[in-house]
Each structure stands twice: as structure tokens, then as C-alpha cells.
């Protein structure tokens, strides 16, 4: 929200300095985002051209002698067609910054002639778009005076950052009200006098809406006949220009001025271009309108419009139509002020992608009581600037505001903020803010909320009002209470596991990435998603239309972007959410990662002793198991099954399971079709682990870990080679070995696989190293033979394998 200091003082009678106003604005919660003190304009001086002669080497340039009011005239080269002797204009001297050109002036030579500054146009000083000549001031303009002071453009511009709840401060009047309540002056001009009209407005308004779900809660319309539209007054143009608006004509400028002055958006129709009565209705599917921004918008039945008998004239509450806009030929004007549903405005503006000052205010909630007053204020300004004869105001569908009543115990201020505010002080603050206050004189105030404070709904909101006006800086810091003991854990198990997963993947040389939660529909379907309920109603881009079912598309695309820029060997991971449905329980917490090129755990790239190998399925498997182990999953009981979802390579992927039903994740190299869909190439592998599928750890009886038990006896290793069918997994053999003697066998791992004609067709040999760790005595040969026998029997029973001869 931007405004000038003089504009604020139209509503606030105060002797406070600019610095005091800025400090108070921030104190009361209207944080100042920026201030332009207009210092850049103060250096430009009014100067008079004494002589103007033709440049010796340029037909379109003149050499001027300029009186600056400081004694010795200066020489300036100028190309403006209106440069002449006797002209009083604006001079920029060396060292002055010209905002319209974004340059700082210096002494220079133009076609061999020295120039000690420049005579400025309005566009060069960002006063308007006029650039046909230099500024031409009246002859009596005082030479040597600051041009900014003379024109009144040295007015500081203040920009305030508003929180969404402060719709009442989207107008200068509302900001002045808050400053007055904070003791920085007196609010003036609070009553808008009605303008008497002659006769009824000939154009009627029809509200075509469902009474149970109205989108328009009131509509006021007035005709002013015989207006003469032209430029608005200079002071109004300057104010609009200062806040970043382009003056257009008096009628349009009036609506913009009222929008920022009182936070009341208005619209004006050229009455001659409106056919018949106006109807406020839902748009028809496929209906179009050419808006004032020269863009054509296609509407749906979720959008609402103001239409006449020929068609749409305005997108309700957001932007007017080009067809009925006011121009220099307008003689009769319809002034419209309506009260629109905030949710409807927000949805329509978002779906159509239109951001306007009207939408900004309506979607936050405007003052309903300003609907008719806005028409009265605009009518007065139209009569002042353009003349004309007004009719009576036509108002339909409006129910007068009924104030919300709140019982407010003043003790709530102390309870919620720690501030000690006296009963009468709290009552005075609320009264100055416009609340109607009655009370018992002791503890409880009966407060009625004014129409412009739709955000105040309960006691806590009133506490906020008292606190910010009394002074947030009055709250004294308080130390946190001493708990006296170590607190229990604060983070949830899932939060702890998320941190552990990130840490372990980082230690394995992977870099964390944060990718969009949205992907294209095609990618979503390719990675197990694409459900209708996961489509976005308003995607930020066409290729971000669906909630992601997997982290892998984003990571793979990120890897390819890096590869395209020369970083081919990299490993990325992300721990975030994926979506299987539109319910809370359908959101999964997943740790996913990909490796590309030679980015293995041991390192990537080329070496004199031998290049690193391309990554593959076992790199992804190791990453997935590392995450599960770090998160506390029982890795020794995890089952690895061959194959995975369709986006993995069918022969180079696997599934991690805990029992027959609990899927903990997938890993492997990627299917060529999936990579082609993503336009990704190279050696790639990846994994996804479902952190939320890991069983919760069992509650331990004690606070300490169990005692460490170490054996004092030497471990023994024995090798076994089993001949099994080629379809038998090596993991099944390892499980069978471990189950043969759980107390004695400390571990088993495969160290060799052999296939050949000597074994027979469809057979393979799997060699396993078994570690035996006695706990109470040294093993004898008989013990080893008995254990070996049990191992062979277990493997034969569970896999059908026989000991290789």
C-alpha cells in the first residue's frame, strides 16, 4: 500500500515529522517497507533559456545559454523542438541523477560542443509519458527555485506492507484512523456527505443469483449526465503517478483515487455504450470479454460478470470491459459500487490470472457501509472535475450492516500478552479505533465491531488491537521457565528418521535436492500416479499439473539438467512427501536418491590406476539398505525380491520387504522407456525407501543399552559350496544357513557363484563363507562336523541344494 505524506495529511491532522510517522506505523503493526523522500527531484532547478542558436554540426540540436539563478549562465546542448529563447524550464546539472534515463549527468561534449547539463522533459523526470519537448513552465516561475518544491512533487512516498487481515488499511483513510488512535494526530473528514440527485437512475440492476449462496451482497448505481471528460487535475495526477498508477482521464482517475483513498473500488461505465439494464449473473460457459488490459478472457460458469442486453461488460469486482470504458467522448457516465463475495473474487482472479487493485481489496473484504458512500464521494469528484447532473442512487440487494457484539474481559490482555492495561485505557483505545464500547466499569467491556473491521471476530482479536496501540515494545522480555530436569524427546519418530535418512545419505556422498511436488500428468502416470483427485485445479505451469507419486522424476530431471551443463557424475537425494491419494493418510514420507555416471560411494571420475565403474543396481541397493539401517529397520530380517515397479529395469531391480505384506522400498536401474519419457540419458540407478512403513521401535524396559557380551574364544570360518537350481536366490541360501544354528553361526556371506556344463543344465554353484562363534568353549572337530551337517540339511530342505562334490 503506497501513499504520499500530503495525502495522509488530508485525513490526519498532525504536527508529527515524517520520521515519527514512520516509527509509529511500524509500532502499530503497519510495517513500513520503504520510503522515497524524493531527494532525487530536489536537485533539479527552474532555469530560463537566455539564447538559443543552431548547433554548428547538427541540424536538430541547439546550443542554449541558460540562467540558473546562481550568477553565471551555463551552456547546454538540447535537441528538443520547443527549445527557444525565453523558455522557462527544468535544468539538470552535472552530478544530478535523471530517473527516466537511469543516468547521472556529467559534463560532456555533443558533436564537439560542451554541455553542462540538460533541459529535462516530463518523461525524463517520470512525471508523465510526455516526451515531445522539454518542460515549459509559466514565465513567472521563479528561476533558481527547486522544481520539486515549485510543483509540489517533493512529497515523500511511504509504502506499507499490509497483512491479509488489515483490509481496513487498504485506503489512506484507514491508515490515518490507526495513527490517530495511536495518538499521532486527529482524524478528519470521517463523514461523506450525500450528493442530491434529480430523478431515478434509468438503468436498473438485476441480481441473478441464488439467495442461499449470493456472490453479490449489494449493488449501487448512479447516472451522471452531461459530463465533460478530460485530464484530471494536476494534484490528482501527481498522487496517482507517485504510487505507480498512470493517469488516464478524469473519470477513470477518480475511481482509482477513491480505491486508494478509502479502500473502496469503483467502476465507471460509459452510459451510451450500455444497452438496456445491467444484470449481475454467472458467466455462460465459453463466454468471452475483452477487458481494459486489452486481453480477451474466456469465462466459465464459475465466474461472475456484469452484463447488459448485448453481453458481458465487466468481470465482477476485478476488471471492467473495454467496450463500455470511458474516454474523451463520454458524456453520460454510470458509477458502480458493489459488494462482492471475497471467496468468489479470489477464485475468479486466480483462475483467470488477473491481479488488480480492486481484486486485492475485495478478496480481503471491503467495508460494506462504504458501498453507497463510495458512490457519493465519486459523484462529488465527478461534478467537481467534469460537471454534469446526477440522478438518485439505485441500490439493490444490500442489507445494512449489523455489528458483531463481543464480551471482552480486559484481563485477557494480561493473560495473552503480559501487558498490564487498565480497564479505561483499553476502552479508550478501542473507542479511538472506531469500536462502540460499553462496560461495567470494572472488568468486562461490551464491544461492537465497526463495519470496516471484518477481521475482528473474538476476544483475542480485541487483545491484539489493544496491544498494538498500547505498544508492543511495552512487553518486557521474560525468561523461559526452568524445567528442573531433562525434557523427554520433542521430535516424533518420523521426524527423527527423516533427519537420520538425510544424514546417512549425505555421508555416502550424495547431495540433497529439493524438487517440485508437481509433475506432468504423463510423468505421474508413468511412475504409478495420475489419479484424477491428484490433479491441481490451478497449476503454475502446464507440466506441473499433478501431485507427484514418486520422488524419482524430479531427481532424474535434476540430474539431467546438471549433466547438460557438464556435471555428469553426481548423486542426488531427497527426503520428502509423495502422494497416493487426496487424504492425509495417502501422503507418504519417502527417502529417494539417484546416482548417475560413475558417482559411486568410493568416488567418481577418471584415475591413473583405473577409471571408476558406472553405477548399477547394487549401488542403489546399498543406499537403500543404508537408509533402512540408519532409521532402525531390522535389516537382518529384510527380504530382497527380484524385480520392482514398471519404471525400473525388470532384470536389474529389486523390492525390499519385511514379511510378505510390508514393502519398505524399491531399488535398481531404470527402464529405458521411463528414461526416454523424461528425456534423460546415461548410466543411472536409484531407490525409494518408505520411511513411514518402518515398524515403530519397541519400548525398552530400561533407559540404558543391554550389556555388551564378547566371546573370549576364537571364531572359526568354514566354506560351503551348494549346487542349486539357477532360479534359487542366493539370499535364500544365506537365510537357510543362518537358520541352521542361530546361537553358533555369527554370519554368512556369498563369495562365489559358478555356472558350467559340469554342474548340469539349469544349475549353479553358490559358495558361502560361514562364521562360527563359540560363546562358552572351544569347538571340537565333532562340533564342527555336527554344525556342518545341520547347515547342509537346512539348505537342502529350504532350497533343494546339495553340497558340491
Image: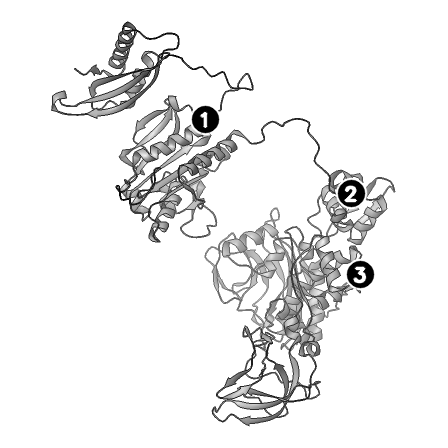
Mark 3 nearby-residue class (10 Å; few <14, some 14–19, many ≥20): some
Q: Earlier in the sequence, mark 3 or mark 1?
A: 3
- First of labels 1, 2 by sequence position: 2
Q: Are marks 3 and 2 in contact (CB under 8 Å)?
A: no
At mark 3, the secondary structure is loop
Vertical relation: 779 (above or below) 371: above
- Find residue 419 and name its label: 2
**Residue 251, disc:** none
Depicted 237 relative to depicted 163: above or below: below
Residue 13, quarter of the rendered image: bottom right
Report the quarter where the C terminus lies: top left
Q: Specify few, some or many for label 2: CA neighbours under 10 Å numbering under 14, 14-19, or 20 or more.
A: some
Secondary element at image label 1: loop
Q: Earlier in the sequence, mark 3 or mark 2?
A: 3
Q: Report x, y in % for residue 713.
A: 37, 12
Q: Residue at x 52, y 29 (%)?
A: 493
Q: Place residue 390 in its image quadrant.
A: bottom right
Q: Nearer the viewer, residue 497 or 339?
A: 497
Look at the image and tell me whether residue 740 can be seen: yes
- How many neighbours does mark 1 have within 10 angstroms: few (below 14), some (14-19), or many (20 or more)? some
Q: Which residue is mark 1?
A: 632
Can you say which quadrant of the picture contains the N terminus? bottom right
Residue 32: x and y, percent? Answer: 67, 58
How many dots with numbers?
3
Q: Return the residue nearer the eye: 389 or 512.
A: 512
Residue 281, quarter of picture: bottom right
Pointer 3 residue: 185
Q: Is residue 100 left or right of residue 734?
A: right
Q: Nearer the viewer, residue 264 or 792?
A: 792
Of circles 1 and 2, the one toward us is 1
**Colour mode?**
one colour
Amino acid at each position: 500500500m503506497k501513499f504520499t505524506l500530503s495525502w495522509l495529511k488530508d485525513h490526519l491532522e498532525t504536527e508529527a515529522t515524517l520520521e515519527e510517522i514512520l516509527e509509529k506505523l511500524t509500532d502499530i503493526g503497519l510495517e513500513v517497507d520503504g520510503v522515497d523522500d524524493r531527494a532525487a527531484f530536489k536537485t533539479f532547478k527552474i532555469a530560463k533559456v537566455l539564447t538559443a542558436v543552431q548547433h554548428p554540426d547538427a541540424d536538430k540540436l541547439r546550443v542554449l545559454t541558460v540562467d540558473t539563478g546562481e550568477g553565471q549562465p551555463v551552456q547546454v546542448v538540447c535537441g528538443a523542438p520547443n527549445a527557444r529563447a525565453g523558455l522557462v524550464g527544468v535544468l539538470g546539472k552535472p552530478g544530478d541523477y535523471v530517473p527516466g534515463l537511469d543516468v547521472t549527468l556529467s559534463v560532456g561534449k555533443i558533436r564537439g560542443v560542451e554541455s553542462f547539463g540538460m533541459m529535462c522533459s516530463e518523461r525524463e523526470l517520470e512525471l508523465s509519458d510526455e516526451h515531445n519537448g522539454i518542460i515549459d513552465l509559466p514565465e513567472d516561475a521563479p528561476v533558481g527555485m527547486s522544481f520539486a518544491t515549485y510543483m509540489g512533487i517533493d512529497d515523500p512516498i511511504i509504502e506499507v506492507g499490509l497483512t491479509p487481515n488489515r483490509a481496513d488499511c487498504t485506503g489512506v483513510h484507514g491508515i490515518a484512523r490507526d495513527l490517530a488512535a495511536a495518538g499521532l494526530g486527529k482524524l478528519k473528514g470521517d463523514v461523506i456527505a450525500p450528493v442530491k440527485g434529480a430523478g431515478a437512475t434509468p438503468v436498473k440492476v438485476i441480481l441473478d443469483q441464488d439467495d442461499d449462496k449470493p456472490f453479490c451482497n449489494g449493488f449501487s448505481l448512479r447516472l451522471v449526465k452531461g459530463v465533460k471528460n478530460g485530464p484530471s487535475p494536476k494534484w490528482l495526477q501527481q498522487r496517482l503517478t507517485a504510487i505507480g498508477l498512470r493517469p488516464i482521464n478524469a473519470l477513470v482517475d477518480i475511481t482509482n483515487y477513491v480505491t486508494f483513498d478509502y479502500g473502496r473500488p469503483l467502476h465507471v461505465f460509459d452510459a451510451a455504450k450500455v444497452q438496456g439494464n445491467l444484470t449481475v449473473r454467472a458467466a455462460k460457459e465459453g463466454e468471452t470479454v475483452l477487458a481494459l488490459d486489452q486481453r480477451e478472457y474466456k469465462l466459465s460458469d464459475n465466474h461472475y460478470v456484469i452484463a447488459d442486453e448485448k453481453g458481458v461488460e465487466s468481470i465482477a469486482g476485478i476488471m471492467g470491459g473495454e467496450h463500455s470504458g470511458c474516454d474523451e467522448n463520454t458524456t453520460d457516465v454510470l458509477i458502480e459500487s458493489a459488494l462482492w463475495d471475497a471467496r468468489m473474487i479470489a477464485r475468479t482472479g486466480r483462475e483467470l490470472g488477473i491481479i488488480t487493485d480492486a481484486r486485492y481489496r475485495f478478496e480481503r473484504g471491503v467495508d460494506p457501509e462504504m458501498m453507497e458512500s463510495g458512490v457519493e464521494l465519486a459523484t462529488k469528484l465527478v461534478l467537481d472535475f467534469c460537471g454534469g447532473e446526477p440522478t438518485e442512487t439505485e441500490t439493490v440487494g444490500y442489507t445494512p450492516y449489523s455489528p458483531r457484539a463481543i464480551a471482552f474481559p480486559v484481563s485477557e490482555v494480561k493473560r495473552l500478552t503480559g501487558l498490564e492495561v487498565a480497564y479505561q485505557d483499553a476502552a479508550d483505545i478501542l473507542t479511538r479505533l472506531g469500536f462502540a464500547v460499553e462496560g461495567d466499569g470494572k472488568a468486562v467491556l461490551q464491544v461492537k465491531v465497526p463495519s470496516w473491521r471484518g477481521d475482528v471476530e473474538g476476544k483475542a482479536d480485541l487483545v491484539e488491537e489493544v496491544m498494538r496501540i498500547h505498544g508492543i515494545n511495552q512487553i518486557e522480555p521474560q525468561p523461559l521457565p526452568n524445567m528442573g530436569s531433562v525434557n523427554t524427546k520433542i521430535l516424533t519418530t518420523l521426524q527423527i528418521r527423516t533427519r537420520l535418512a538425510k544424514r546417512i545419505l549425505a555421508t555416502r556422498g550424495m547431495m540433497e535436492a529439493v524438487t517440485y511436488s508437481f509433475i506432468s500428468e504423463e510423468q505421474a502416470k508413468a511412475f504409478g500416479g495420475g489419479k484424477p483427485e491428484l490433479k491441481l485445479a490451478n497449476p503454475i505451469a502446464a507440466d506441473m499439473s499433478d501431485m507427484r507419486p514418486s520422488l524419482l522424476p524430479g531427481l532424474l530431471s535434476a540430474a539431467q539438467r546438471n549433466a547438460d551443463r557438464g556435471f555428469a557424475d553426481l548423486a542426488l537425494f531427497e527426503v520428502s512427501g509423495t502422494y497416493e491419494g487426496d487424504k492425509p493418510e495417502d501422503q507418504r514420507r519417502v527417502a529417494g536418491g539417484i546416482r548417475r555416471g560413475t558417482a559411486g560411494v568410493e568416488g567418481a571420475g577418471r584415475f591413473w590406476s583405473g577409471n571408476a565403474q558406472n553405477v548399477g543396481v547394487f549401488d542403489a541397493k546399498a543406499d537403500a539398505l543404508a537408509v533402512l539401517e540408519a532409521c532402525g529397520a531390522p535389516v537382518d530380517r529384510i527380504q530382497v525380491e527380484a524385480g520392482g515397479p514398471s519404471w525400473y529395469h525388470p532384470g536389474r531391480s529389486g523390492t525390499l520387504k519385511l514379511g510378505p505384506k510390508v514393502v519398505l522400498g524399491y531399488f535398481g536401474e531404470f527402464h529405458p522407456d521411463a528414461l526416454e519419457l523424461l528425456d534423460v540419458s546415461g548410466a543411472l540407478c536409484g531407490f525409494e525407501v518408505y520411511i513411514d512403513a518402518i515398524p515403530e521401535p519397541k519400548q525398552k524396559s530400561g533407559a540404558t543399552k543391554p550389556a555388551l557380551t564378547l566371546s573370549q574364544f576364537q571364531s572359526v570360518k568354514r566354506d560351503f559350496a551348494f549346487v542349486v537350481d539357477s532360479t534359487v536366490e542366493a539370499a535364500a541360501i544365506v537365510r537357510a544357513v543362518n537358520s541352521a544354528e542361530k546361537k553358533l553361526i555369527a554370519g554368512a556371506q556369498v563369495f562365489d557363484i559358478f555356472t558350467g556344463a559340469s554342474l548340469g543344465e539349469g544349475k549353479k554353484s553358490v559358495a558361502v563363507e560361514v562364521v562360527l562363534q563359540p560363546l562358552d568353549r572351544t569347538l571340537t572337530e565333532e562340533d564342527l562336523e555336527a554344525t556342518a551337517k545341520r547347515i547342509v540339511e537346512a539348505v537342502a530342505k529350504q532350497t533343494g541344494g546339495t553340497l558340491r562334490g
